[in-house]
Amino acid sequence: MSVSERTGRSRHAGRAAIGAVAYAVTVFLLLPTLVIMPMSVGPERYLRFPPNGFSLRWYAEYFGDADWINATLFSLEIGVVTTLTATVVGTMLALALVRGRLPGKGLVELLVVGPVIVPHIALAVAMFLVFEQLRLTGTLLGFAMAHTILALPFVVFTVLAALYRFDADLERAALSCGAGPIRTFRHVTLPLIAPGVVSAALFAFIISFDEAVVSFFISNLDRKTLPRKMFEDIDYNVSPTLAAVATMLTLLTIAALVGSHLIKSRLDRRTRTAGS
Amino acid sequence: MSARPARWLLGGRHYSEVASLALAAPFLILAFVTFILPLGSLLHESLFLPTPTLAHYERALTEPVYLRVMLRTLRIAALVTILTLLLAWPLAWLMARSGGLKLAILVASVLLPLWTSVLVRTYAWMVLLQKNGVINQFLIGAGITGEPLRLLYTEGAVVLAMSHVLLPFMVLPIFSALRGIPDDYSRAAQMLGASEWATFREVIFPLSLPGVTSGCLMVFLLALGFFVTPALIGGPQQMMIATLVSQQVREMLDWSFAGALVGVLLAFVLLIAILFKRAVRLDRFVGSA
Amino acid sequence: MSQSAAVSGRSVGIDIEGLVKRFGTVKAVDGVSLAVEPGEFLALLGPSGSGKTTILMAIAGFEYPDEGRIRVGGEDVTWVPPSRRNLGMVFQKYTLFPHMSVLENIAFPLKMRGVNRAEREERARAALATVRLDGYGERKPSQLSGGQQQRVAIARAIVYKPRVLLMDEPLSALDKNLREEMQIETKHLQREIGVTVVFVTHDQTEALTMADRVAVLDQGRLQQIGSPHDLYEAPRTAFVAGFIGETNFCEGRARGAAAAGQRIGVTLDGGHAVEATAVEATVEGASVKIAIRPERLSVADPASGIAARVEEAIYAGNATTLLLTLPSGQPIRLRVPAGGAHASPTVGEMVGLSWRAEDARAFGDVA
């Protein structure tokens, strides 16, 4: 074997090895969630892999159970409210940070990043303390507030990114055409940062819908979110209904990812700037 | 129109200070009610109730039971960080060298777990690791063991499951850093006589360090305060700070002590975050040197 | 015959008084006063950092001055928000709204002024015709070339008949040939419509080609304002002499005192005694800088003037550019028409350099 052949081989061997590990990691990442899916359609009381039959009874159990349905509806309610609030408040803040003159800007930025750095257990327990006193546990208002502050940093980051990419001269052009600051935002800025805002809204919804830690603490006996209900079920009995719920949630996540990608590329195409 | 209006009304290219404050006000109010007030109250409880005291903190930091919990948490967080780093680096490397459909699939396989609920992922691991779960079924079926192994409710299970959950947070920063390295660097190194391994060791790996540091910090910090996975997969023998806090609040109703635990956790997190900021700055100097 | 909306009679002048603008500790604009005549095409010319863009932004309303006033058509607009100044503006990167069609872009200012849809469309199409882009109304900006986008930007800026049109280096993003074409077109358009134009550029050829008057700025101060001819033939500072056209500079000391416009004797560093015209009052012994255009120099045999060594002779058909070096090491550049006595010297040859005193301008070396 020549020197070049030898080094060539070891080079390829090295690369192949890393590649193999990488693919193994990919399988590791996807395996658990993908294993659940076939198991949720097994007819047996306990989960088998591979399932020895096909049955949708666990899905039927879910839809027939008031506890599950109520929890789901509550989570949806909270999700919608959180999305609206977080998107509006977050976009307003992003505008103030980028285009405005905010006194104490550094402090505000710390407050935005706070909920990301502080562990959720700390926030959950702290909010539980205050919400109990304010009688906000188990309420739509309480949950919406909690979830909004958790989702806000991501909304702000996303909208900030969109605003930085956005050419400030376009706003100046609009101003010079006679549009005041509010009309400039409505006719020029907003349409062009729309993909970012939509992304942010989607993030906010997913964060709220899947939020488990805070929900664990500020749920009530009769008003709990879907994650809280799941938590209880996992603790007490590992019923296959859970597998059905888990599967549905995973499918929803896939739909959300694909949907957001499609919406974004559509919006991006419509507002593509000259020369890009 | 000839008098100069008060500074605080000035608009023009930027929104005026008044407008900026108005835009930021809803956030500030919300942040106060859901962030500052609650954390402040909790810390207040830990320091001032029933009388101004440091006793709760003393208890948290000196009593052996609780000390063990802290150390266990640190140990698990460190193990998770190391494991995710070892798993993430090859994947990030492969992603950085891929394009088109291959890259899209790899990215999707990282994003899907990231956006799936933590509960769903943790539950999936429970199903896999149960006594009559998938892994045990496989092991028995393949004749490797005769009896189902006790996989769940062990420290190993917690580390494994947490690594799975936090893996995307390690992959993405490293991928981003590797992606940012121009191909020309390795070409230049090879023209100068460096072997493939030397190029990797001297050029590629150091340049990926900012991503590695970022990822490690993020995973470590998240692992420290993690609640869901330890609560479900860990048994009472694997208590971590988060599950301890939960127990103190819900079962013991000892708010002050829970507050102290949270205080300690926060102090730790803030310390690491500050060190991180400095590390990032140092990293830049090393990179350009 | 063009469909232009003639606005002659509507154009107004601009008065800038004592404009000062600071960014931190730096004075971007340091006490600039100038007046723009109604209907004139004024260029603000200068290197980057000269303050020219800041002045334009102040006129537009995107910067508020720290001191000074700006009047448009006699009205004090210093503190009026930009959306209410009713000026037209064309930006360097065209800045067309990418999510609107060409027609929607042009109609946008009319929409902001409450004009109804039918009339908006009609006037927008008329403006589009003025810039000779009929039929492009339905396209998106990304489907147009750079030059076409620039024309749409101009159409958008004039459709509502503003009193003044501001242009911020609008042609610098275009390639050379297109730029020259657009320079002429813009100038024609301005004359057709009769609007007052303030045009910012760092390219002196562009300024000299297009403008009625040019204001030369350096480091926030106004150096000189005048017609292209005045600036070229009679620069009032060394900076203007060097910035506009090609100039040779020689340094030396004044042999005697002189008043502005008078002859002055100068001893060059290197010893030669020469004559020049003083630009300002100069005292004996003051250090001066002499500026001479390349076409005003002549060469003859070495005895007849300053002895200079020929470094390069660049033949260009109708003329030859000679690069000489003075004994002091000073490089000199001049042009000799074809067929002249010393039209093709050899490299290394010594020649005698001379000029007429009226053609050499002596500036005091003021800090």
Image (tube, helix red, strand yellow):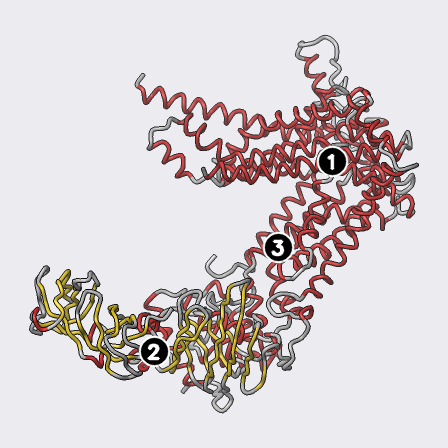
Q: Type of residue at label 3?
A: Pro
Identify the image quadrant of residue C203: bottom left
Discs 1/3, front:
1
Q: Residues within 10 Å of mark 3 (few under 14, many from 20)?
A: many
Q: Residues within 10 Å of mark 1 (few under 14, many from 20)?
A: few
Please say whether residue A235 is visible from this viewpoint: yes
Identify the image quadrant of residue A237: top right
Image quadrant occupied by the N terminus of chain A = top left
Residue B220: percent from the left, percent from the top?
Answer: 66, 31
Residue C269: percent from the left, percent from the top?
Answer: 22, 66
Mark 2 = which residue? C236
Which residue does the image show at 70% across and 49% down from the upper left? A112
* Marks 2,3: beta carbons within 8 A: no
Discs 2/3, front:
2
Q: Type of residue at label 2?
A: Arg
Count of labels in the image: 3
B255 and C167: which is toward the camera: B255
The residues tagged by marks 2 and 3 sit, at their Cα atoms, a distance apart of 55 Å
Discs 1/2, front:
2
Mark 3 = which residue? A195
Q: Are marks 2 and 3 on the same chain?
A: no
Q: Type of residue at label 1?
A: Ala
Chain letter for the residue marked with disc 2 in the picture: C
Which label belongs to residue B267?
1
The residues tagged by marks 1 and 2 sit, at their Cα atoms, a distance apart of 68 Å
Asked which secondary structure carries label 1, the reply is helix
Looking at the image, is C118 positioned above or below residue A39? below
Q: Are marks 1 and 2 on the same chain?
A: no
Which residue does the image show at 8% across and 62% down from the upper left? C349
